[in-house]
Image: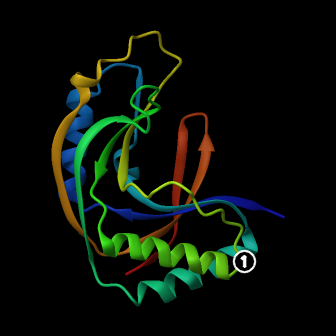
Amino acid sequence: MNQRRVFIAISLPEKERKKLINYQDTRLLTDCFRHTRNEDLHLTLVFIGDVFDEQLALICDVLKEISKDFKSIPIKLKHISYGPNPKSPRLVWIEGLNNDQLTKLRDSIEEALIDKKINYQKENRQFKPHITLARLNRQFDDPLPEAKDIETDLEINFEAQDIKFMESELTRLGAQYTVLGQYP
């Protein structure tokens, strides 16, 4: 039986994506950063993990059904920093503000996945909307820039118009993403 590594995400409008790309290109210049590719910038709503192929259609059905209950959702991202633990960082991300609609959407998806007996473990930590801008590349000896040199406030505001069902294939060059479904 074949398994796939999957997640549910919200994509960004081109205007907001360009702001993040500009930040990457001007502030994350050393080899210790492996940029998230421009087309791969996204906000992960629910990371499901490995599922068998026969569960993919069930997940698509869940997303199709849940998306009918939601209108566009305002997303506000504002602070770029090392994360998720600044004392032992693994990435550079832009963090956002939680909002009730986004949390309700995420909770609805999680509950439906569990109800449908999808191979999914609900996360115990609080949901923190964010977009990963770069991962730390431990293969290089360059010293990591100080936090003050990468931290900044950057206004990223948009209306989430859809959710995407994504596959993540891990390769030597990083994760490669494929859209399996898109739901308005």
Q: Position of residue 118 (x, y in %)?
A: 69, 73
Asked whether 158 or 3 is in front, the reply is: 158
Image check: 24 left or right of 163?
A: left
Image check: 128 left or right of 165?
A: left
Q: Position of residue 178 (x, y in %)?
A: 53, 60
Farthest right residue in view = 1
Q: Position of residue 37 (x, y in %)?
A: 39, 43
Using the rendered image of the protein, determine whether residue 101 is visible from the camera's viewpoint: yes
Circle 1: residue type = Lys
Q: Quadrant of residue 123?
A: bottom right
Image check: 43 left or right of 177?
A: left
Q: Residue at x 41, y 90 (%)?
A: 68
Using the rendered image of the protein, determine whether residue 57 is visible from the camera's viewpoint: no
Location of residue 51 with respect to 115 vertically, above or below: above
Asked whether 84 or 154 is in front, the reply is: 84
Q: Position of residue 4 (x, y in %)?
A: 68, 60
In the picture of the structure, the residue carrying the numbered disc 1 is: 117
Mark 1 residue element = loop
Location of residue 17 with respect to 160 vertically, above or below: above
